[in-house]
Image: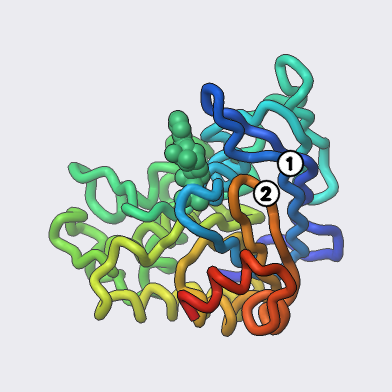
Amino acid sequence: MSQPEDGNAPVLSVRDLHKRFGSVEVLQGIDLEIPRGQVVALIGPSGSGKTTVLRCLNGLEVPDSGTVQFDGGDTVDFAAKPPRPVVSGLREHSAMVFQHYNLFPHRTVLENVLEGPVRVQRRPRDEATADAMSLLGRVGLADKAGAYPNELSGGQQQRVGIVRALALKPRLLLFDEPTSALDPELVGDVLETIRELAAEGWTMLLVTHELRFARDVADSVVFMDGGVVVESGPPSEVLEAPRQERTRAFVQRLL
Ligand code: ADP
């Protein structure tokens, strides 16, 4: 499960990202930089725009303006109409782990994992199956390959969600509150899997309310509120010695 490529350029550079839903501008100029092999935790109150940032990076939403550059490649300029190079290209670089797993209920675990590599990426089924089984083995779910999602616990389903993302061999993993739908006793296994991926050098952007986990695992923390980045830096600063009053109030409540 090692990171597919290495080097020193940031995997992701986001500049001045804006997104409006109707009359509400939910992203008001977001800057983000994610160095290779690092974990960036995105935190903030509900409604601050965290999920929208992830969805913009994964091509699920189209920002109104701003630029995104993956891995020193072409810069996507969203102010250009239509954005060039095409937005769908963003999906090739990142893979998302959703809050509610988003597995196909009528497909087995293995079929869920193979959907991206075989149907979307057109990789040979045999090779993709071998990779998928190896990834399922890594998270202790090889024996569940033929099971259906509703036969698994929430924690197991989320680990399948993580494997499904890894099977795409993305340069960047996006996690959208991956443990917030889980019963408390199931949270630990999923966090442990994420911790292992961090130790293996995967590059990740992690939206989470688990501030203690963020403090342990993240290289940097970005605090958003009201569609702007209020404060960012290492966990020792943002979580333990915040400079901004808004960050302090949020962190005190949750840490
Ligand atoms: P967070 O992840 O920090 O909770 P979101 O990015 O989900 O915040 O939402 C930011 C704001 O954008 C919220 O006010 C939310 O209601 C609004 N929003 C998100 N998606 C849509 C949408 N598809 N249509 C209209 N409003 C949306």
Say which element carries label 1: strand
Q: Nearer the viewer, residue 37 or 121?
A: 37
Residue type at mark 1 is Gly
Residue that label 2 marks? 228
Say which element carries label 2: strand
For residue 40, which quarter of the picture? bottom right
Q: Nearer the viewer, residue 109 or 95?
A: 95
Mark 2 and 1 residues: CB-CB less than 8 Å, in contact?
Answer: yes
Left or right: 34, with 40 as reference point: right
Furthest residue in direction top, as rendered: 81
Number of residues whose C-alpha sits closer than 10 Å to that of mark 2, classed few (under 14), some (14–19) or many (20 or more):
many
* Residue 230 position (above or below residue 22): below
Residue type at mark 2 is Val
Q: Position of residue 157 (x, y in %)?
A: 28, 61
Q: Is residue 181 visible?
A: yes
Furthest residue in direction left, as rendered: 151
Q: Position of residue 141 (x, y in %)?
A: 30, 71
Query: Colour scheme in the image?
Result: rainbow
Residue at the image point whose x is 78% and y is 50% from the top: 13
Q: Nearer the viewer, residue 130 or 140?
A: 140
Residue that label 1 marks? 29
Q: Quadrant of the N terminus?
A: bottom right
- State the count of labels: 2
Left or right: 11, with 255 as reference point: right
Q: Position of residue 131 (x, y in %)?
A: 46, 60
